[in-house]
Image: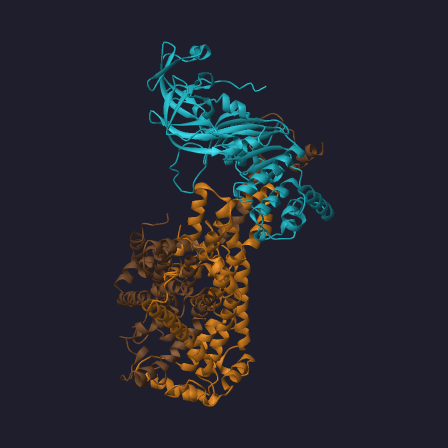
Chain colours: A cyan, B brown, C orange
Amino acid sequence: MARIDIDHVVKHYVDDRIVQTNTGRPALDDVSLQVADGETISIVGSSGCGKSTLLKVVAGIEDPDQGRVRYDGVDVTGVRPQERGVGMVFQDYALYPSMKGKGNLAYYFDVHDSSKEEAEQRVRETAERMGVGFDLLLGQVPTTLSGGEQQRVAIARCIVRDPPLFLMDEPICNLDAKLREQTRVEIRKLLRKFKITTLYVTHDQQEAIFMGDRIVVMRDGRIEQVGTFDDLYYTPASRFVATFIGSPPISVLPAAVTDGRLQLAGASWDLPSPVRAAVPDGPVDLAIRPEGWRLDEADGLAVSVRHIERLPTERAAFAYGTVAGRNVTVILPVDHPERDQLTATPDLDRAYFFEPDGERPLHTPGVLELF
Amino acid sequence: MTLQQEATETAGGAEPPAGTESQVREPAPSRRRRLERALFVLPAFSFQLTWGWYPLLMAFVISFTNARVRGPIEFTGLESYERMWSDPLVAEAFRVTAIYAVLSIGLTFFIPIFVAILLMEMPKRHIRWMMLLWFIPLSGIASTLLFRYMFNAQYGLFQWIATEVLGLEPQPFLNSSDQVLFWLVFPGILFFGPGLIYMATLQGIPASYYEAAEIEGAGFWRKMWTISLPRLRPVISMLLIFAVIGSTQVFEYPMIMTGGGPGGASRTVVMYLYELLQNLRYADATALGVFLFIGTMLLVIIQRRFFREDPDA
Amino acid sequence: MLFPRVGRKQPMLRIAWWAVVAFLCLGIALHLFPFYFMLVSSFKSGEEVLAFPPTFWPQDPSFAGWKLVFQIVQGSAGQLLDAPLWLFFWNSVQITFWVLVIGIPITSMAAYANSKLQRGPMARWSFLFFIGTLMMPAALTLIPNFLLTRNFPFALPNAPNIPGTDTAFPTFPIWDTHWAVIFPICFQAFNFLLFKGFFDTIPDSVIQAARVDGGSEFNIFRRIVLPMSVPVYAVTIWTAFSLAWDQFLWPLVVLQTPERMPMSVELYLLMERIVQSGGTSAEAAAAEAEVMQDMLGGGLSWNGLMVLAILQSLPVFIAFIVCREYLLRGIRLRGLK
């Protein structure tokens, strides 16, 4: 197991034109991250944000243009991936098509001058760890395996060598929904069991929340914020994080503050004192999560409802509608009657304030004390 | 525990944990990576350099000299070009080659494209054997030999077709300077190698494209025009270049079938170049090669212009 | 799929469909006819191949052609050939063997490196370096290549003198050896293109996974990439094979000793000797027939040549049949990009 330091890494991709015309933004732009021993970090972001590139830089598949990568304090920048001994699972599983499952697992030992017996034994041990029915997969070539089975072989191929570091690049995004649910629990169990330091890349925030001890949100080659889910949810470092995390997403409404009163779509409320200190007079963007509304109060806003989505298991329903032309989402009790109009009041204690048309948060509600 | 040890072990001797501090240094493996890359490329590189680019460069050098078997070599400027330019046989050879190239491309280039498109229409289980039979190859020398036999004016099969089947006058075939170039195209018709490339490319078109077009109401020709041909376009463009280069360099068909006759009516540029080489006129032969090169390049440039916009790029 | 899936029962579509089938079958028949005619002619007697009208089935099947050819093979037919025929066959086999053994590995390794190891402008330059000669007419490099085999490593009629002395640089002539035939066609740019097209479609992640597993680049190439690439190897082996086997102009230029000629050139020389084609005018054709009549005394004419043509075609044919499974799967060309 290892502690990982990623230190001011910059990475540009080159294309294969003779004259390099694109001097555009780098795939990774000054990325720094510390991963503690045994920790699982989820990296989440929209496609093209550099999350896979970061993983490849850590694996050594891509060389960074600047910056260092250290394993346990040992500088491994420029060390070939062959000599790093990490385990990696790819989005398309990247199994060796010409080898059976067993050959896929044993390739590591083949190229490391291990004895046949050792390889055999390690493969057997791993098969036991991977659970029931895994033996059957070892005798088949990857093309005959289903997606879920390929994925299990790919994971086994990584853990067979007891890697100090486990890198997963969207390992379950090609599976169908039900299998994805099940596999993510399995992976989580494995990670907890072996306490391997893990970087887990995904574009699905639910998956990121489920897998990671901490979550990294990336955007355009930069890290926006690192933290636990609560950190990201209640104290986002930027408007991007606030809108990216949370489903359904946060609603952003342009408002104005005059003399400590918030004006929005003809209504106005007094700001609570901690907010008043942080938010100056003038225009401001108010952001409310679906659960941050109070229903049916006298000074509420009129929300015209487009449709209502019921989630019986959560005993709730989401109302999607508009306020003053902006999309908002409001959580309702599951038995709330269907209506075209709602009256909803923003709960200003649980509201987020951003500078208008800027990224910087002026005030965030802070982590909710549940207990 | 053991994992820790293994991490350092697998990191191997090449990367001892000595550099604990983040000192900046050029890592050794990066050099190794470059070396590995070089080893992959080096053999082919040396072959391509020695037998590809170096002779090409020397061709231009030699064409400006008086290169001969003995004696020192002197630069004589454009002398050999002038000699070749004023040689009536050269002009004749270019005329012959141009006519042959036009006939050969016009008559043979487009057949495999349409055959490939039509073959893909056949039921799946029949495509395989039909394709094999269409594209089955014959040795080029052997088929040229066979055609020489069949074109014989006295007892050839084609004479039989002309007189007995079509009821024409006996034809001179290869003995007529008017017809000879047309008949020389025929051995080339047997080679459908490009057809395999077209089929492989067509095979890569997802069926859903055609289904979508069908829903839009596209018919046979429209689907061919908007789906099949655009997909084939880069390949057609490439093979057309090869066809142009290949047909302007035709040698073995006239050499084996007519030997350049009758009266030079099928003496192509490369055949004349071969004659010059046999007469040890190296510089002249190379100058002739340069003429051919310039001519072919012009055609290739025109062709590239014509095919410039690439729908898949 | 140009024909719609449904509604094929419509009379117009049916007619069109059967027209296409008929066209393809007719093409196949026309295409196979030369094979048939070659085979049939080889079993005709010496007189029958010169008979007019030509026969489509041997009136008097005889193995004269085959027998005679096998006599030449054993070197007993005397003046016609300078050496027993099997020797030329063996020369062709040797040349083709070395072209494949040297050419295929180096071409595929370079294409692999270009596709998966090199990046950026370097990859582009290297690509152009390798396929650039594809656009140049080989006739241009014929003379320099010929001179290069005479005075390796100088592509000049004579090696230049060592500066300051009267002695010429030492040279290593490979002219008139098989190596002179083999080396120039070892690296074939078109095969490079075929390999590159194929390797480009192998997902990077498989190679990256193997790197993470610790395989050296060469080990990855041998253990992972090679087994995945059997189709493209089949295709390139086939193209390289047909090219090397059927070479004509280059061995004619570069080989001198009759015993070293490959089968393709010898076939031509033998034909020239039998047919004595001085000119191709009407009288010459008549004279040609006369000469043929003389040859008939020896019993050899087009029937024997057809036997040789079949022998020359057989390896190309067999290579095609052997590789047939892979031909379509191995070609993944995307044009000259």
Q: Position of residue B10 (x, y in %)?
A: 66, 38
In the image, residue B45 above or below residue A172: below
Q: Position of residue B221 (x, y in %)?
A: 31, 60
Q: For residue C182, say whether it is visible.
A: yes
* Side of C331 where A266 appears, left or right: left
* Side of B104 where C36 appears, left or right: right
In the image, residue A196 above or below residue B192: above
Q: For residue B281, say whether it is visible.
A: no
In the image, residue C244 above or below residue A88: below
Q: Position of residue B281 (x, y in %)?
A: 36, 64
In the image, residue B123 above or below residue A230: below
Question: How many numbered marks appear?
Answer: 0
A119 or C336, nearer to the observer: A119
Quarter that holds the N terminus of chain B: top right
B26 or A15, nearer to the observer: A15
Quadrant of the rendered image containing residue A19: top left
A139 or C235, nearer to the observer: A139
Q: Position of residue A332 (x, y in %)?
A: 46, 27
Query: Residue at the location (39% across, 88% down)?
Result: C51
